Image (cartoon, coloured by chain):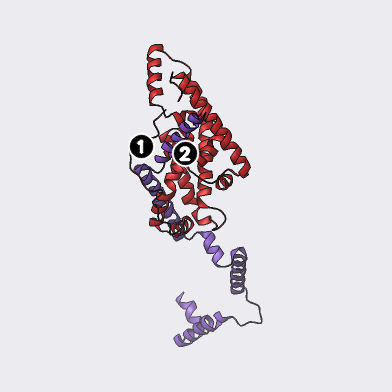
Chain colours: A purple, B red
């Protein structure tokens, strides 16, 4: 039995002697995989997704706040409250009156020309 | 069965690896995009992974595939590794052993089919004798051990890991490791003795 134990120990020693030998092509394959993983990861970092952009303005809360503010702006633009002056009047109506006065046109003239 | 005591290629790392930086630090560097760290880790951990896979499977091509897959999992999980949670080598050994067990389970039905029909009896016997002569006796015996015993024996007597380390890898107690390795060694000794008798060798 002692001889058999010795034989087993000898076989273990043989196996250990071969342990640190590693195929070069396997090392190349593993390093190529590592590079592929690294490149994929850096490409993912470079590409900001819609989700990333959403998170940058505060997630869903940020997005809903932005949408509400935009909608309110559009609504105020279309139907301003009566107590507020319409800024468009300052530009459009005054300008048109001024031009009409300049041309010295009256309604009779307009009717004739038509 | 292949002769697993000789290899066609040269050493690629292993025992000569520098002690600094640690495996964990290298993994962190790789996660930060350092390619050189991946090369160092391949040199340190690849041979250990391959050695275990080779002894678990007894087949070089399969051992290479398992090693590549285990290392691939290492690269992929690198950003999620929590330093200090465990030894990196423990994690890698565990992944490697699990991959080996999965592969052996998948392979078993095919292996049984292949054994079935020896067409030319005479040629087959000659082949078998030649094969036996070339056979790695240890591998032939290891292949007969139950999975857990084989894992414990390989980690203890070929990888030379401590019992607590093996207990960590196999997720069992140190006593269980001792029991598995003792039973494994006893079975191996008996199998080697039986093999010598089959081949007609004298004892001693």
Asked whether the residues under marks 1 and 2 belong to the same chain, the reply is yes
Above or below, B147 against B37 in this view is: above
Question: Can the viewer see residue B144?
Answer: no
Element carrying mark 2: helix
Chain letter of the residue beneath label 1 in the structure image: B
Q: Residue at x 43, y 33 (%)?
A: B59
Q: Residue at x 37, y 14 (%)?
A: B123
- Quarter holding the C terminus of chain B is top left
Q: Nearer the viewer, residue B74 or A77?
A: B74
Q: In this rendering, would A26 be left or right of A80?
A: left
Disc 1 + disc 2, Cβ < 8 Å: no
| Mark seen at residue B28 | none
**Of the residues under marks 1 and 2, which one precedes in the sequence?**
1
Percent from the top left, x then y, of residue B67? 45, 42
| Mark seen at residue B53 | 2
Q: Residue at x 46, y 23 (%)?
A: B203
Question: Can the viewer see residue A45?
Answer: yes
Chain letter of the residue beneath label 2 in the structure image: B
Q: Nearer the viewer, residue B100 or A46?
A: B100
Q: On the image, numbered disc 1 is attached to which residue? A: B7
Residue B19 falls in image quadrant: bottom left
Above or below, A42 against B203 in this view is: below
């Amino acid at each position: 039995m002692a001889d058999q134990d010795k034989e087993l120990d000898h076989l273990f020693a043989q196996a250990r002697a071969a342990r640190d030998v590693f195929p070069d092509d396997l090392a190349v394959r593993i390093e190529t995989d590592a590079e592929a993983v690294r490149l994929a990861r850096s490409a993912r970092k470079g590409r900001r997704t819609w989700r990333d952009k959403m998170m940058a303005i505060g997630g869903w809360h940020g997005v809903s706040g932005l949408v509400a503010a935009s909608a309110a702006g559009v609504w105020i633009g279309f139907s301003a409250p009566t107590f507020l002056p319409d800024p468009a009047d300052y530009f459009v109506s005054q300008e048109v009156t001024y031009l009409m006065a300049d041309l010295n046109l009256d309604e009779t003239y307009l009717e004739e020309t038509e | 069965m292949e002769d697993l005591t000789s290899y066609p290629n040269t050493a690629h790392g292993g025992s000569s690896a520098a002690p600094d930086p640690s495996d964990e630090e290298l993994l962190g560097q790789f996660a930060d995009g350092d390619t050189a760290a991946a090369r160092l880790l391949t040199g340190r951990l690849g041979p250990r992974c391959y050695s275990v896979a080779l002894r678990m499977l007894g087949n070089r091509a399969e051992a290479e595939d398992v090693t590549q897959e285990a290392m691939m999992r290492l690269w992929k999980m690198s950003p999620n590794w929590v330093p200090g949670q465990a030894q990196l080598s423990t994690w890698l050994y565990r992944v490697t052993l699990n991959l080996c067990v999965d592969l052996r389970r998948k392979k078993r039905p095919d292996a049984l089919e292949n054994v079935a029909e020896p067409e030319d009896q005479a040629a087959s016997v000659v082949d078998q004798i030649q094969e036996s002569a070339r056979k790695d006796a240890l591998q032939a015996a290891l292949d007969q051990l139950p999975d857990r015993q084989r894992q414990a024996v390989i980690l203890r007597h070929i990888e030379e890991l401590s019992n607590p380390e093996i207990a960590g890898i196999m997720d069992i107690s140190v006593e269980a490791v001792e029991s598995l390795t003792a039973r494994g060694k006893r079975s191996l000794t008996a199998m080697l003795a039986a093999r010598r008798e089959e081949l007609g060798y004298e004892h001693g």
